[in-house]
Image (cartoon, rainbow, N blue to C red):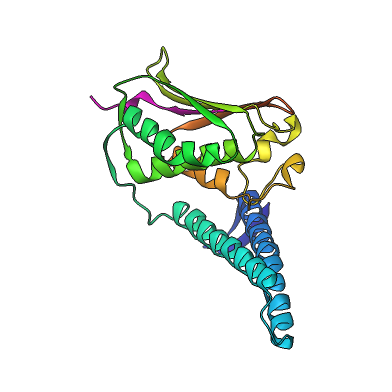
Amino acid sequence: MNIESFLCDGYCIVVIRDITLDKDLVEKQKKFVSNISHELKSPLTAILGFLQILKEEKEYNQVILNYMESETIKLKDLVLDILEVSKLQSYELKLQKKTINLSWLLLKICDENINLKASKFNISINTNIQDGISLIADEDKISQAIVNLLDNAIKYSNPHNQINVLLYKNFNQEILIEVKDSGIGIPENEVCYIFDRFYRAKNALSIGGNGLGLTIFKEIIEMHGGRIEVASKVGQGSTFTIILPKENLAG
């Protein structure tokens, strides 16, 4: 609470302003900067350390070069994701909305993008997609959100598991996309934090990632007026449900 007072025409004017939100914003910004610094420091330290080793050696070490390449790719991906989060949260970004066939788009993503990646881990993608669902949306952003969610499902699934992808309309004519996996699951007390920037559940720390994929996913869905529901049990898997309002339906 911030209290200010001043005199005006002989009267004492007292202004009381609630600055709780301002403080929360400052704290979030401090935390964001701290997280960025930590995430950038690790790969940069590794790269600089190995560069020093290479300078001292007469011949190049292929193992070291491969590790440096891997860390550089992680660093590039992290920077791109940070820029994407910043752009999504900027007032300057405008969605390029048009009528898209969501049924076709979801099948295309699963068949052309996700199946290939899933097959490398012996994970199968099962689709149950209602035909003829079209909506008004930014195709690139909706595609990005769906790919992020499916990538996440693959990452936290075990080999030989199955991921189920469903698309349908409910009795309220809302559009629902469900992604169900039977992977490691999320601890109940951590579900509320998984969309926070850089947050990673404790049982997933050994798995690669920077903790921004679900942040980007949530920002895109909310920009389309949608919401997300999550149901998960440790060791049994997770179900993420995208719910888009009927106002987004086309036709």
Residue 233 in percent (x, y) is at 71, 25
Residue at (68, 80) in percent of width and height: 51
Q: In the rendered image of this protein, does residue 38 appear above or below residue 21?
A: below
Residue at the limit of the structure toward the front, as seen here: 59
Q: Is residue 33 visible?
A: yes
Residue 146 in percent (x, y) is at 46, 38
Q: In the rendered image of this protein, does residue 41 appear above or below residue 92?
A: below
94 or 233, which lies in front? 233
62 or 239, which lies in front? 62
Residue 100 included in the magenta stretch of the image: no
Residue at the limit of the structure toward the top, as seen here: 171
Q: Is residue 10 visible?
A: no
Residue at (72, 82) in percent of width and height: 52
Residue 102 in percent (x, y) is at 34, 30
Q: In the picture, residue 45 is in which quadrant? A: bottom right
**Location of the C terminus (image quadrant):** top left
Residue at (65, 38) in percent of width and height: 156
Region rendered in magenta: 240-251
Residue 249 included in the magenta stretch of the image: yes
Q: In the rendered image of this protein, does residue 241 appear above or below residue 12?
A: above
Q: In the picture, residue 72 is in which quadrant? A: bottom right
